[in-house]
Amino acid sequence: MMNDPAQPLFLGLDSSTQSLKAVAIDADLRIAHEESVNFDADLPDFDTQGGVHHGSDGLTVTSPTLMWVAALDQLLARMQSAGFEFSRVVAISGSGQQHGSVFLRRGARQTLARLDPDKPLRVLLAEAFSVADSPIWMDSSTGTQCAQREEALGGAQATADLTGSRAYERFTGNQIAKVYETQPAAYEETERICLVSSFISSMLAGDYVSIDAADGAGMNLMDIRGRTWSQPALDCTAPDLRSRLGAVVASHTVVGAIHPYYVNRYGLLPTCKIIAFSGDNPCSLAGLRLQHSGDIAISLGTSDTMFGSLTDPQPSASEGHIFGNPVDPEGYMAMVCYKNGSLTREHVRDHFADGTWDGFNNALARTPPGNNGAIGLYIKEPEITPPILKPGIHRFDSSGSAVDAFGDGADVRAVVEGQFLSMRLHGGNIGIQPESILATGGASANEAIVRVLSDVFGAPVYTAEIPDTASLGAAYRALHGWRCQQAAAFVPFSDVMADAPAFRKCADADMAAHEVYTALLPRYVEHEAAVIAG
Ligand code: XUL
């Protein structure tokens, strides 16, 4: 359907690891425009691979902050050349790769306030950063700082109870602690620390913009229940940190209006609102319209991820993360990430089926739910949930004995069942109780795999083919924030999404099979513990 040129538009931006994307929707949720800038290909002078630079220690991973600035110039200019009607945009929100940090030097606030529309942002902000290379989520160089944090806060579980996650290397508080320890002069020079999300919105507003409670939870600094900075967590990070962070706001908050720079240069409306930006995973939750507690998404991609809305989070030191919910200021989202996903299923397909998905699916068809008691853990990549660093295949027969091989087809069923039992176990451990599952990613197209997923959880599975859930979710959040502002009250996200087309149901649980998995789960727990213990 055509977009009505008189209708307002809502713009979502997504500053991810490899690219900056934009998607504009109208109030009926129809996509009006899409555009993107790829960091490696379109900004070659920054010389990144996959948008990042790897340090020589093998642990440090950064991105040049100015590259994200230059990408915004380029994205908006491309949209203008394509004839995008900026004057129809009434609200902008956005998504940023989680955990990445931007260090703005003293005086940068004034620089932002005085952006000169005759010059590109990358020229105007060239001197604005006290740390030129932003640490990003792929960095794992802060082991020392993580240990210090958990020590100071009373242990891993206490850290999780307070902040929603135990101390993780990529989480921003640990990155800030490292900057303070290794570059004290740069920290001293720093006026403001933004997340990627709040940095892009700060550029648009021409002023420092608050961090939202969903992305803020990825820092190990926020009290997850109070949704404000935790003083003990700030104290074990760096001095005078609170004033460098600004406030935490609910994700639907209008945090400012567009700066005149963009009105002059691109024809945006001076009244265009900026809605708090958030992290990419929270924005994906919005993009997949997971609005009720128990709505869960499982992305079956290179690595598998499970996330969803919940009201009663149980932060755990062993697995997963709790964040604020990006579309419900009272709610939470939980997320569990796996390293072993499609590549591991493909490995089993290639070694224990005939190398085809038909062969894989035939193996599933000729083995029963529960695999006659056979259980396997297939660790091709060092796993994070649960932490099992050493690759290997661990097989247990129905009597619980470790065995070297399984019978016909059983490895195929064991890899799929093992992955989903692990999600049921570890998701359940942090409070995820799926009532309906939205499957995304490559393997969600495989009905045989999706059937096992539905049976393991005892919940219906729907599929969604939405390529860019983070940027779309950012656009939905722009609409949501704008609707709340118009109503001068919180409007439930489900009201805003009411006319969205329903997702396609692809499996209903077979409850007899579900009972088999429920009975098998304690044995899975036992074998997993044995593998972790080595
Ligand atoms: C989440 C995480 C990544 C980044 C980049 O904790 O580290 O998913 O958000 O996408």
Image: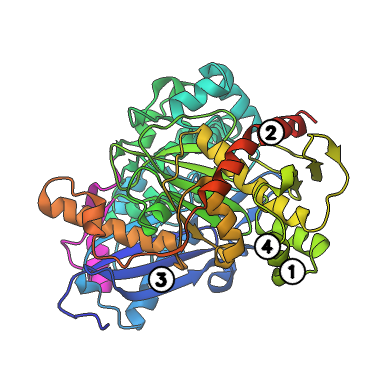
Give the magenta range. 250-275
Residue 302's spot in the image, x, y percent?
63, 59
**Which residue is drawn at the image coordinates 64% and 55% (left, top)?**
53
Up/down of 181 relative to 441, above or below: above
Nearer the observer, 258 or 345: 345
Residue at image mark 4 = 365
Q: Tags 1 and 3 in contact by the CB under 8 Å rule?
A: no
Residue at image mark 2 = 523
Q: CA distance from mark 4 to mark 1?
A: 10 Å
Secondary element at image label 3: helix
Q: Tags 2 and 4 in contact by the CB under 8 Å rule?
A: no
Q: What amino acid is found at the position of numbered circle 3 in the picture?
A: Leu
Secondary element at image label 4: helix
Q: CA distance from mark 2 to mark 1?
A: 28 Å
Residue 503's spot in the image, x, y percent?
38, 64
**Which residue is drawn at the image coordinates 47% and 47% (left, top)?**
307
Nearer the observer, 433 or 187: 433
Instruction: State whether label 4 is within 8 Å of ligand 1.
Output: no
Is 268 colored magenta in this rendering? yes
Secondary element at image label 2: helix
Q: CA distance from mark 2 to mark 4?
A: 23 Å
Q: Earlier in the sequence, mark 2 or mark 1?
A: 1
Q: Earlier in the sequence, mark 4 or mark 1?
A: 1
Q: What amino acid is found at the position of numbered circle 1 in the picture?
A: Gly
Residue 8 relative to residue 33: left or right: left
**Which residue is drawn at the image coordinates 31% and 68% (left, top)?**
501
Residue 257 appears in the picture as rendered: no
Residue at image mark 3 = 75
Residue at image mark 1 = 359
Residue 137's spot in the image, x, y percent?
56, 47
Q: CA distance from mark 1 to mark 3?
A: 44 Å
Q: CA distance from mark 3 to mark 4?
A: 48 Å
